[in-house]
Amino acid sequence: MDEQALKARLPGSIAARVQTLKLADGKVTLVLEASGLDAAGRAGLEAAAKDVLGAADGVSEVRVAMVADRAPPPPKPRIIAIGSGKGGVGKSTLTANLAVALARMGRKVGVVDADVYGPSQPTILDTKGGKPEARDDKLVPVQSRHGVPLLSMGHLVEPGKALAWRGPMAGNAMAQLVDAHWGDTELLLIDLPPGTGDVQLTMLQKFKPEGAVIVSTPQDLALIDAQRAANLFDSGKVPIIGLVENMSGYACPHCGEVSDPFGRGGVETAAEGTGIPFLGRIPLALEIRKASDAGAPNTSGDGEEAEAFSAIAAKLASWIDREAV
């Protein structure tokens, strides 16, 4: 009996999985494709093949090998950087609220808290005390109750402990947070530290973002630093998605009168002067501070603040969809 006749003896369900069948000196070597089968299914397939072929005339031994196509690794999430030239302009608050707003739109979004010296995302996204697991030498993000997975140095060091690290160490730490097991996460928002230092340079070199959002208060000093951040992204050929004006207008909770302690419209004017899109403004509101401290981003609810964050998130989602075409 030759090899073709042996294969013809196999049931169709087994024959369809035959990769190779060799006969030599009464010994059959059979290679079967076993994708989609669990351990029991593979064992059953092997036993059935041996029963059929072992009963053929002239066959003294049947050897069966299994092969299976490896599932392709999940695609890496698209990266959007959220940056500023200086601290204290609300970059982390914006990042968390954009992430929650995008998740509420059905986007699979995660957050990397790259501000290794002053991590605040575990507080804003209510994951304080969470500890990421490690698998295959990579971190597994901590899941927040808002549907946004997160990795932060705040998950890895003791609360309140100061990190006395030189710049390259901070850059390496950020790289480990980004190069993690993000699963089916499609979009990764990176909350960058203020300035244009080692963390930003490492990100541009190893994980070039698809785009960047720059946040600033309206005052001139903040705008000068925001321009430096924009210049860094320009030098790295990262598109600036747009500018956000934060702490823009304060409504007195008693009389309702609106004042502008940091000015108003400066970021929008800067956007017009540079041709960069203006994404919107966020008011200076006590509710935003309370929500951030409570781990309940404003986009989890309703009101003027939630609408402001959601409107910016919608513009960001539109930009992402256009770039995917």
Image (spheres, rainbow, N blue to C red):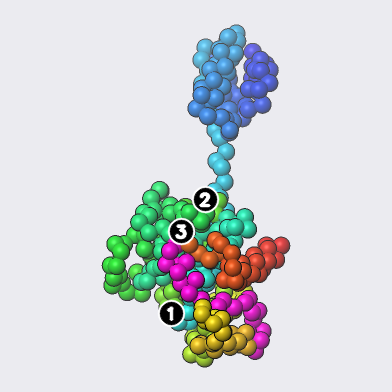
The answer to whether residue 239 is magenta is no
Label 3 neighbour load within 10 Å: few <14, some 14-19, many 20+: many
- The 10 Å Cα crowd at callout 2, few under 14, some 14 to 19, many 20 or more, is some
Q: Earlier in the sequence, mark 3 or mark 1?
A: 1
Say the numbered circle drawn on residue 87: 1
As helix, strand or loop, the secondary structure at mark 2 comes to loop
Q: CA distance from mark 2 to mark 1?
A: 31 Å
State if disc 3 and disc 2 touch (CB < 8 Å): no
Question: Residue at label 2?
Answer: 183
**Quadrant of residue 121 within the rendered picture:** bottom left
Compared to 276, does 315 lie above or below? Answer: above
Q: Position of residue 255 (x, y in %)?
A: 54, 82
**Residue at screen point 68% across, 21% down:** 12
Instruction: Choose between 295 and 203: the one closer to the eye.
Output: 295
Q: Residue flagged by tag 2: what amino acid is it?
A: Gly
Residue 297 drawn above or below residue 71: below
Which mark's residue is nearer the viewer, 2 or 1?
1
Q: CA distance from mark 2 to mark 3?
A: 12 Å
Q: At x 42% / y 67%, what residue is drawn?
A: 293
Residue, disc 3: 150
Mark carried by residue 166: none
For the point 53% across and 25% down, which residue is it? 42
Residue 35: image location, x then y, percent: 58, 33
Look at discs 2 and 3 and give the one toward the viewer: 3
Figure check: 314 above or below 107: below
Left or right, 99 with reference to 294 = right
